[in-house]
Structure formats: C-alpha cells, structure tokens
Image: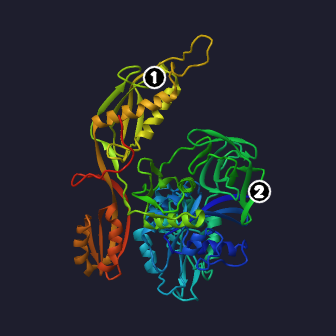
Amino acid sequence: MRLLNLGILAHVDAGKTSLTERLLHSVGVVDELGSVDAGSTRTDTLALERRRGITIKSAVVSFAVDDVNVNLIDTPGHPDFIAEVERVLGVLDGVVLVVSAVEGVQAQTRILMRTLRRLRIPTLLFVNKIDRRGARYDELLRAVAERLTAEIVPMGTVTAPGTREARFVPGIGPWDVLADHDDELLSAWAEGGVGTEQLCGALVAQTRQALVHPVFFGSAATGAGVPELITGIKELLPAADADPEGPVSGTVFKVERGPAGEKVAYARLFSGTLGIRDRVPFGEARTEGRVTAISVFEDGTDTPREAVRAGRIAKLRGLAGVRVGDALGEPRKDHGHFFAPPSLETVLVPGPDTDSTALHLALTRLAEQDPLIGLRHDEERRETSVSLYGEVQKEVIQATLAEEFGLDVTFRESSPLCIERPSGTGAAVRFNKKDGNPFLATVGLRVDPAPTGSGVEFRREVELGAMPYAFFKAVEDTVHETLGQGLYGWRVTDCTVTMTHSGYSPRQSHAHQRFNKSMSSTGADFRGVTPPVLIDALRRAGTWVYEPVHRFRVEAPADTLGALLPALAALGAVPETTETRGGTGTVEGTVPAARLHELEQRLPGLTRGEGESESSFDHYARITHGNVPFRPGPTLKS
C-alpha cells in the first residue's frame, strides 16, 4: 500500500479544518460531520481550539483511498502559530492549500504559497466555500494567478456559485502551462495531436515535481467538489519516498504529554525501521533513548504496533528528553527555518497566588511543544519572558496556563525582540593561575563581525590536541550560551568567535589518593572562565542593536490613500511603491515590528473598513537614533 503524508494549509477561517472533517466523512472514517462552531471536529481536540474555533496545534488523522494510506496533518491558519506549520512542512509529501472563494487570496495564503514553491512541495489548491454568497470563479482564478502563482491548471468549472446548489464540474482547463514545461507536449500541440492520456500524464508528472498546481473548487459544507479533490490527492500527489531497509532516520515534529505525564513524540520516519525496545539517538547531544511503545496512523486513528517502517508517521513513547525538531537516528540535511523568527517579546506577570515552581514547570512543558517561545529567566528580577509572533499567541498562552495548569498570569505590553551584532573586533584572554583567575583554565577568544544571516561560528586557532576535546567542547557550548545576551541584553549573532589561547592543568592527585579536582582542570573550569573572557572581548569589539522590520502590503480603496499614507509615515513605515488600479490602491513598504500591531488596528478606520494588509518579517535594521533599547537581565560580569 502506498503512503502519503499530506498537509492541509490555509489562511485562518478559509475552512481548512472543515475540509479535513469532510474528507474523513467522505471516505467513511467518521459517520457524522464534526463542526468547528460546535467544537466537535476530530482534529481540534484542545478545549481552547474548540472554544475559539481556530487550530492552534497540528493534528494527525488518517484515511485510506483505494491503495493509498493518507496521513493527514491539519495545521494552524493564524500567522501567530506559523512555527507549528514550519515544523510540519519538513515531514510532508504533498499539500492541499485551501483558499476561500469569498475572501479570496489572503495574506497568510501568499506567505504559505511562497514557502511551498521555494521548498518545491507538490501542492493542490482547493477553493472552498463556493456555496457562500459572494463566491467567485473567474475573478478568483485571476487573483490566484496574479497573487499566488501563474503555474495553475483549473481542474473544472463551477455552476451556480454563491448558492447552496453550487457544483463543481470536472474537466481540465487551459493546459498551455503544461506545455511550458514539456517540449514533447508542446510539439504535439503544434502538430494538433495532443491526446487525453498524454495530457494527464504530463499533469501528474509536473504536479509531483511542483512545477504546476491543479486547482479544484468545492465546498466543505455541502461536499461539492470533495470527491474530485480526493481523486486528485490519490492520483496527482507523490507517495512517500522511503527506504525501510536503510539506517534509521526521522524527524520529530510534535511533542505532547500522555495521560501519565509521559512524553509522546510525533515523528516521520524517512529511512529504516524502528521497533519497540530499540535504542535510538536523538537531538543535538545524540542522547540515546529506548522506544517503549509505538502507534501508527491508519483507519482513522492511531493503532499500536511493534514497529514503524520508513514513510510512516508514528507516535513514540520512551524518549524522555526528546524535543520538537530533534532528528532520530542519522540526521538529515538541515533545511533551516522556513519562516521568520518571532519578532516580539513579553514578560509574564504571575498572579498574587501563583506558585512560581508550578509556573516554571508549566512553561517548560509549553516550551517542549513550541521551542520558539524562547523562555528566558532573569533570576535577579525574578522575571520570565517569552517570544511571540503576535498578540493572539499571547492570549492563547495565557488561556492555556489558566485552563490546563490552573495558573493566573497576565503579560506586560509586547516589545520588539532585537538582536545585537559586533561593530568591530575585540579579543581577551585569561591565563591559568594568573591575575586572580579562579579557574584552572586558560581561554583566549576573539570576536569578529560576520556576514548578515550567518549566525554564530566557533573556530579554533589552537591545536585540537593541545588539551582534551571535552574542554574545547565546554568552551564552544558556553560561547553559544553566553551570546544569548550581549552588551545591551539582546542575543548576539552574525559573528565569528575564535579560540586563540588554551591551557589546562593535567590530571593530578596526591600519592595513593583519589583524583583531586582542586589540582586538575575540569569542564567546569572552562565553563566558568569562558563567559567573562567572551564578555571582555565583546566589550572591546562593541555591538550595535538592530530592531526587527516587517515588509507590508496594504490594499485599500484608492480614495483613502490620501489619509493612509501620512498615517503610515507617522508609524515609522517607509512606503516603497504605491500603485492604483481601477478603484483599488496598493502600498508596499517596510514598517518596524514594534508599530505593526498599531498599523493593523488603525487600518479599518483609515480605509472605511475595506483595507486589507499582509506582512512578514523582512530584516533587522540598525537603531541609529534615539535611545538604544536595553533589555533587562542578569548583570554582565567580567
């Protein structure tokens, strides 16, 4: 049986979860349709999801279509939970991207499609809600071609759009886009001899290569067009590429807690076979864990199995230290982050009766599920901050802490999450047993600026054999940890840290006595001396602070641009292009992340409620005016 790991992606409220429910009903997995409004869907299982009517966490269900077993992953549509989508993209064989026939191509849809095209993930488009008033066909296809991709193949037409009688009529539309990628097809067309079989073969091949994107229309509410979509999923998307006989290699894309508090890891296995009682290394530290239970997804649910083979998604128990994003077995090539990092930060304010230990445990649990919330503890001020994509995410964290853990917290106003980059070169060194150095270790470090986006690189100018490797590793790990807070309190990045000096006291003890760590260097000595040396080097190099900047696009009635443009300027936005087409004006430019929320709040009033905006992280800009923001935190000591 062929396997297909399928993602359902969309802008919030496009009907993604409703479509998932309709798919499960159409193939016989569920007898009754669940409802987002009633909180009865199979994939929105969290109480918070059901109450808000939005997907917050990805969920996996399965169904079979003839000889294809589909693992379907429903993902969040709200941009504040884009990190959840990112974790899923790395385990998918194909995607259905849902677009609303009423609202059209929305902001998040564009961001998702750009990413899917960049990663070359085979994608079908499903235009939902053709039964709703205001549903469009020709206009919607034009919008998809203009705002998403011109490489589309309509798979049929729609009759009676905007009514409950709306139906999808199958039939491959204009196929000239297929000829653009197939010389034989182009030649056959020129000779007037293109057969249906050749046309369908080209469609399958090019869809699986992510060269073209078939477009289906339908309604999750009425079921119109869903059988044709199911056929498209079965015939057009590629099966999982897997080698069950190879070395074990997989990726963890979700972690949750079981009834007894045990960790449950959701993993896609790309290679090999993993069985119960097998030991498997995972994570950066390559810690070994023993698998104690396995469930795979089939027949609409997760079913216990003795082993999981490559190509499948499984729930694994027994890996106590596992985290989201960990590689299982042999690591695959890292594709990096698909979406931008969080650009906001907020400080938690515990309620008067909130237990600090319980809060710390709860936040740790949340960080297991979403590492990008970036917990940061300031022991001196007894404060904890979290990273955010937006204000809705803040509300969800607050509600989760209240409902799942019984903890009362509020938040301070969100602020931009800045970074620091070295402005020059600086070096420092501390020698073993000299100048009051309390650590039995010699460490010298030099900090140099590096190209934008390069991150942090650790190098050595000393011989690797000059001291035990564990001591070098202790220095390297501590360098990365220390750079989490620079001279102004922000994470330091885009730099090279080079180890220029090293030295240690060899293992010594008195005669007939056990090892004496007061006479011999340990890893703790190198972990202790590295931070002050690095901070000294960083101070001599100096740092600049950079704030996150988003790229925005606003569409609004053309006659409102006169009021909109000055308001954008007042928010620190920099309009780069302004275009008017018909009665619609479009403004594109950049705006500081700190002012983005205010822009979104003011837009309806400036545009009579008709303005639409989309934004995404673009770059970090150096702060050259006003007070450079300082981030409170532990005191830097040298």
Q: Residue at x 50, y 71 (%)?
A: 12
Amino acid at pointer 1 = Leu
Residue 48 lies, in percent from the top left, at 57, 70
Q: Is residue 413 above or below residue 522?
A: below
Residue 624 lies, in percent from the top left, at 22, 51
| Left or right of 345 in this view: 311 | right
Q: Quadrant of residue 586?
A: bottom left
Between 635 and 630, the residue placed more toward the observer is: 635
Amino acid at pointer 2 = Pro
Label 2 sits on residue: 304
Furthest-right residue in view? 306
Examine the rendering and report whether any part of residue 335 can be seen: yes
What distance separates the C-alpha of mark 1 from that of mark 2? 53 Å
Q: Is residue 377 above or below residue 529?
A: below
Label 1 sits on residue: 440
Q: Residue at x 48, y 48 (%)?
A: 336
Between 220 and 45, the residue placed more toward the observer is: 45
